[in-house]
Image (cartoon, rainbow, N blue to C red):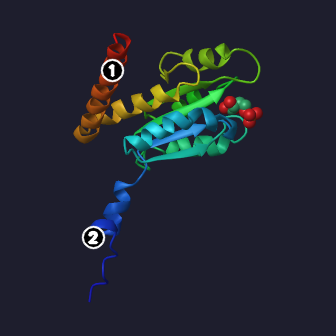
């Protein structure tokens, strides 16, 4: 007879369950030294219940791995990429050169200088290869933008985002109210 279907959690077939947990966002970084600056953004993705994968794929140190991963990300089911790099921050732009997916660049403050080089090298892309650039170390906005992009085609994610906006609004109103005390 037919082999028993392996069950995932909540009694769903395992293959459906793993499809549900397949990463939608790829967070790539030039170095593991960037990781601490990405912690806030990764927390937001978890809070929004967005499955993601985090990888170190350096445009300079592992160019072939980076190109291979960027080339296959879309067919792996990734919908949106967050790419972080500092200094000679080529990763977001190079990643965007290999994928049709939206790429959000996070400039990381390097050990040398104030970080304008990171910002400008991610921001100043040639026409035709866009990278959405957030401000220095701002993985929070990168993650929120990724959630918005996913939410454009997914009502449940959009609803979670609207709730987040309401909560953020309430938090500011509460601070204002306390100022009046
Ligand atoms: C970039 O060089 C990385 O994105 C990182 O921000 C910077 C420094 O890397 P490490 O020398 O700390 O590995 O590629």
**Is ligand 1 less than 8 Å from the beta carbon at label 2?**
no
Q: Nearer the viewer, residue 92 or 35?
A: 35
Which residue shows up at 45% across the image and 32% down it? 143
Tell me where residue 5 appears, x and y as whole percent. 31, 77
Q: For mark 1, what is the residue?
A: 174
Q: Earlier in the sequence, mark 2 or mark 1?
A: 2
Q: Does 125 sit above or below residue 151?
A: above
Disc marking residue 161 = none
Which residue shows up at 69% across the image and 14% down it? 114
Q: How far is mark 2 from mark 1, CA to CA?
A: 43 Å
Is residue 125 visible in the rendered image? The answer is: no
Is residue 104 visible in the rendered image? The answer is: yes
**Image quadrant where one finds the C terminus:** top left
Badge 2 element: helix
Q: Does 91 sit above or below residue 73?
A: above
Q: Does 81 sit above or below residue 90?
A: below
Q: Nearer the viewer, residue 81 or 38?
A: 38
Which residue shows up at 48% across the image and 44% down it? 73
Q: For mark 2, what is the residue?
A: 11
Q: Is residue 17 left or right of residue 111?
A: left
Q: Nearer the viewer, residue 90 or 133?
A: 133
**Most distant residue in the right direction:** 112
**Image quadrant where one finds the N terminus:** bottom left
**Most distant residue in the front direction:** 181
């Amino acid at each position: 007879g037919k082999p028993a279907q392996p069950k995932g959690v909540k009694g769903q077939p395992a293959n459906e369950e793993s499809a549900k947990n397949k990463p939608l966002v790829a967070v790539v970084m030039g170095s593991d030294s960037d990781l601490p600056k990405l912690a806030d953004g990764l927390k937001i993705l978890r809070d929004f219940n967005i499955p993601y994968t985090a990888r170190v794929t350096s445009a300079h140190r592992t160019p072939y791995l980076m190109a291979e991963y960027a080339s296959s990300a879309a067919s792996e089911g990734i919908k949106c990429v967050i790419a972080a790099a500092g200094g000679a921050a080529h990763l977001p732009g190079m990643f965007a050169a290999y994928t049709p997916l939206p790429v959000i660049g996070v400039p990381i403050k390097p050990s040398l200088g104030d970080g304008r080089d990171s910002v400008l090298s991610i921001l100043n892309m040639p026409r035709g290869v866009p990278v959405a650039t957030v401000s220095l170390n701002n993985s929070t906005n990168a993650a929120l933008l990724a959630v918005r992009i996913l939410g454009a085609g997914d009502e449940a994610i959009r609803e979670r985002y609207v709730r987040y906006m309401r909560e953020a609004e309430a938090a500011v109103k509460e601070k204002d109210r306390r100022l009046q005390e």
